[in-house]
Structure formats: structure tokens, C-alpha cells
Amino acid sequence: MKNSLKIALLSMMSIIAVGCKKEDKSPSYHKGDLTILTDESFKSVTEALADGYMINYPETRIKIVTQKEDLAFLDLLKDKARITVMSRDLTPEEKKAYEEQVDLKFLPARFAADAVVFVVPKDSPKQSISMDEIKSGLASDAKNFIFDGTNSSNLNFVAQKLNKLPKDLKFSIIPGNQNIIEELGKYPDKIGVIGLNTFSRPYDKVSEKLRDMVKILPIEDKGKLYTPDSAGLREMKYPFTRVLYFLTNEGNFNIANGFIRYSCTQLGQMIVEKEGLQPYNIYKREVQMR
């Protein structure tokens, strides 16, 4: 009798344990772990959104891993990560590879307008740069433009805007956007090419320090000057405005898709705005009262 009771209790405990395991594995947007891959150029806004999400959902743990944009996309295809941040447009072949390997329709979740900017030391006499100068400079053996590396979002985006392949451009390298700013003074004839989000936080001490070290060159195109200010980004008139978007291989509504939805809601878009970037999904509205 005792043995029968023991067997019955063990059976009940096994059923409960199995039930708990199944419950733990069920999709959940408000608890669990998530790693987000992002290029260093837009790490700041990604971290800010992750912090906001974890405040709203304390049972979530989000880790931001910095990785070159092209390599992060490949890791997403190989199922080594569930979500990555992108800025350049994918080629038709890449979109096809995404849909075949991830088995999802290509639906980029756009959340912010950022920019690639051209900077010089604060005391440089140079006041602007033309599109023609950029094109000719990136074809010159002088390598006067400094990027943060190959496979980086900044290089990829500039190449794409100029209808070139990154390998066809000639440039110098200083690893890291912040390092470019801090070391640019050593190379007075060079022009740094960085992501705006590197120092776009309006009231951040590090951003303020970096902004004080360089000046952003307006871009001259067809007789007009364009700057990466809020209007230039919102209307996408600044030539190197880029739209940041999330890609995921998560087919259900788990933490990755929960994070994406949060980033695109008004609360997430307010965080984007506080980063000094242009929210993609909300715009300021002016109402006149009479």
C-alpha cells in the first residue's frame, strides 16, 4: 500500500514537473533573455531602448553585443542571434536568403532616422563638403576619409548611396566612431566619417565632450547646403540620412518581437527622440487654437 502511494505521488510530481517545463518554454514577451546585435554606430539608441524595455518588464534581461552590420546579418541567418539592427538596404539576393533561411517574410521594423556625418577638428577652416568632393575623395589614393572599419554600417551605407561597392572605395581606418573623433586632431587634412548617434544624445556628458572636439560639415549638393538636424532627418533631405530597422528570425510573439513592438510604440519613439535622432513612427504636430 505504501509503495503504491509512493508511486502515485511520484507520478503526480512528474506530471507537474513536465507541465512546468512546458510553461517555461512557452513564448513570452515580458520575461527571459535576449541578445541584440548592433553596429557600434547605433549602439547608443539600441541600449537606450533596451533599458526602457527592461524597466517596463523587469523579468527581461537584454544584452547588447556590438558587431559589424554585415556579420550580424549573417549570424541572424545562421540562427546565432534572434534580432539585429540594420541601416543599409538589403540586396534582392540578401532578402531572398533571409526569407528562405529564416522562413519569414522580409518585414523590416523601422524605428529611427539616423545619419552618417562627415566631421573635421573644431579648428579646421573647412566649413562644408560637396557630394563631388566625397565621390572624388573616396576614389583617391590619398585616402583622406577615415571610416571605423570594413563591414561597418557607415562604410556600407556611404558606398550604397554612391552606387559603389565598399571594396571599390579608398579610405583610412581608425577602429571605432569615438576613436575617430578623439584622434582626428592628429590628422588635420583628414575627414572622419561617423554615425550621428555616436554623439547625438543632447545632455549626455560624453556626447557633449565629443561634440566639442569636432564640427559636422554640411553637405553641398546642387548649390544647396544640407545638415543632419531634425528637419534634415525628418524630411530626409540630408543626403546621408539612413533609417534604422530591426530584423528578427523569431516567428512567434516572444521577447524579440515584444522588444520590436515596444521600440515602435510612442514610448519607444520618445526614447529615440531623447537620443537626438528622428523618431520614425511619430512626428511632432503643431495645433493652432483660434
Image (cartoon, helix red, strand yellow):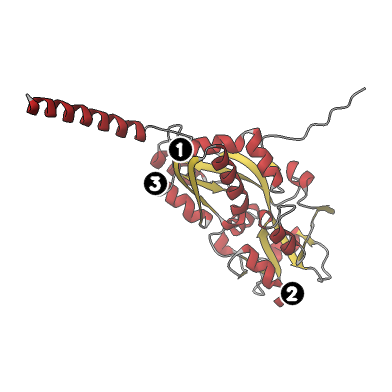
Residue furthest out toward the bottom: 186
- Crowding at dot 2, Cα within 10 Å, few <14 / some 14-19 / many 20+, comes out as few
Dividing the image into 4 quarters, which one contains the N terminus? top left
The residue nearer to you, when weighing 132 against 64, is: 64
Q: Earlier in the sequence, mark 3 or mark 2?
A: 3
For residue 133, what is the image quadrant? bottom right
Residue annotated with mark 3: 79
Q: Which amino acid does label 3 sit on?
A: Asp
Q: What residue type is labelled 2?
A: Asp
Q: Nearer the viewer, mark 2 or mark 1?
A: 1
Residue annotated with mark 1: 31
- Does the residue at mark 2 contact the one at mark 1 (Cβ under 8 Å)? no
For the point 22% across and 30% down, the residue is 13
Q: Count how many numbered circles sit on residues in the image.
A: 3
For the point 70% across and 71% down, the residue is 184
Q: What element carries label 3?
A: loop
Residue furthest out toward the front: 2
Residue annotated with mark 2: 189
Where does the image place residue 9, in percent across and percent down from the top left?
17, 27
Q: Earlier in the sequence, mark 1 or mark 3?
A: 1
Q: Does any portion of residue 144 appear in the rendered image?
A: no
Q: What residue type is labelled 1?
A: Lys
Q: What element carries label 2?
A: loop
- Crowding at dot 1, Cα within 10 Å, few <14 / some 14-19 / many 20+, comes out as some
The residue nearer to you, when weighing 11 against 204, is: 11
Where does the image place residue 208, in percent across and percent down from the top left?
74, 60
The residue nearer to you, when weighing 179 against 1, is: 1
Left or right relative to 95: residue 214:
right
Q: Distance between the residues labelled 1 and 3?
A: 20 Å
For the point 55% across and 55% down, the residue is 39
- Crowding at dot 3, Cα within 10 Å, few <14 / some 14-19 / many 20+, comes out as some
